[in-house]
Image (cartoon, coloured by chain):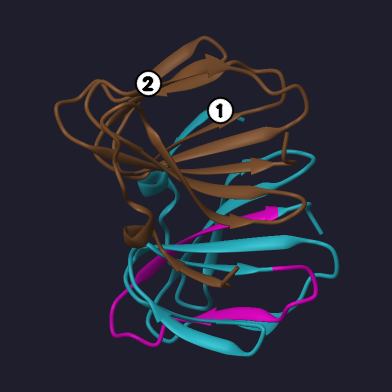
Chain colours: A cyan, B brown
Amino acid sequence: MSRFATLADHTRYGAAKMEKSNVFESERMFCDLYCLEPGQAQKPHAHAASDKVYVVMTGEVRVSVGGEERVLGPGGAAWAAPGEAHGLQNASGARATVLVFMTPKP
Amino acid sequence: MSRFATLADHTRYGAAKMEKSNVFESERMFCDLYCLEPGQAQKPHAHAASDKVYVVMTGEVRVSVGGEERVLGPGGAAWAAPGEAHGLQNASGARATVLVFMTPKP
């Protein structure tokens, strides 16, 4: 795996569902780019022992963490601690990309 | 600490040196925003047991990892594995911001 990456190279959309593209990965963490067409979502879920951070790179995404919900644009970020339900949905009319960090890997 | 953040709220520059603003932090990781005036830098250094990821949000930054160097613009990313020397410098004429993830905390 290269030590350098460009998020544009990881930007790809799927008609069926939100696309995940892995950017970096080690034994301890992963860094993904999520690409969401309008209407696509990641259903709320929780990880017992991992932190997850979302950072919206482009577009607008509705993010929920621990029952709280916000619409985030570029530079908007959210953190789900272990055990906290979290999910996101592109409720806008345009494509969106979200950088995702998770540690440790579930 | 809030579960939501806006990187714009963490963007602050210092005349003396690169500014670091913590966005999220847990026992396992931290997520910072680095803000660099032209010429400011983080000197190359290494962490024995931690991964660090840099993602350029705005501007242009020269990033070195393990002896390899690249100039990265917005969406450019780099990963330093444990033991790998890494650093960055704003060699451009404009301000720059870089999102930083580290796990585990050193």
Q: Quadrant of the C terminus of chain B?
A: top right
Q: Chain of mark 2?
A: B
**Residue tagged 2:** B70
Q: Residue A104 — which label?
A: none
Tell me the residue at 78%/68% (across/down): A82
Tell me the residue at 52%/78% (across/down): A16
Q: Tell us which disc is closer to us: 1 or 2.
A: 2
Discs 1 and 2 carry the same chain letter: no
Q: What SS does tag 2 mark?
A: strand
Q: Is residue B3 left or right of residue B18?
A: right
Q: Chain of mark 1?
A: A
Region rendered in magenta? A81-102
The x and y percentages for residue B73 are 29, 36
Whole-number angstrom distance, CA of label 1 to CA of label 2: 12 Å
Image quadrant where residue B9 sits: bottom left
- Relative height, residue A40 to residue B6 (above, below): below
**Residue tagged 1:** A2
Q: Is residue B97 magenta?
A: no
- Relative height, residue A1 to residue A52 (above, below): above
> Are there few (<14), some (14-19), or many (20+) residues within 10 Å of tag 1?
few
The x and y percentages for residue B14 are 30, 36
Q: Amino acid at mark 1?
A: Ser
Question: Which residue is at the far front?
Answer: B16
The x and y percentages for residue A47 are 79, 70
Q: Amino acid at mark 2?
A: Arg
Tell me the residue at 63%/41% (across/down): B102
Q: Is residue A76 left or right of residue B3?
A: left
> Are there few (<14), some (14-19), or many (20+) residues within 10 Å of tag 2?
some
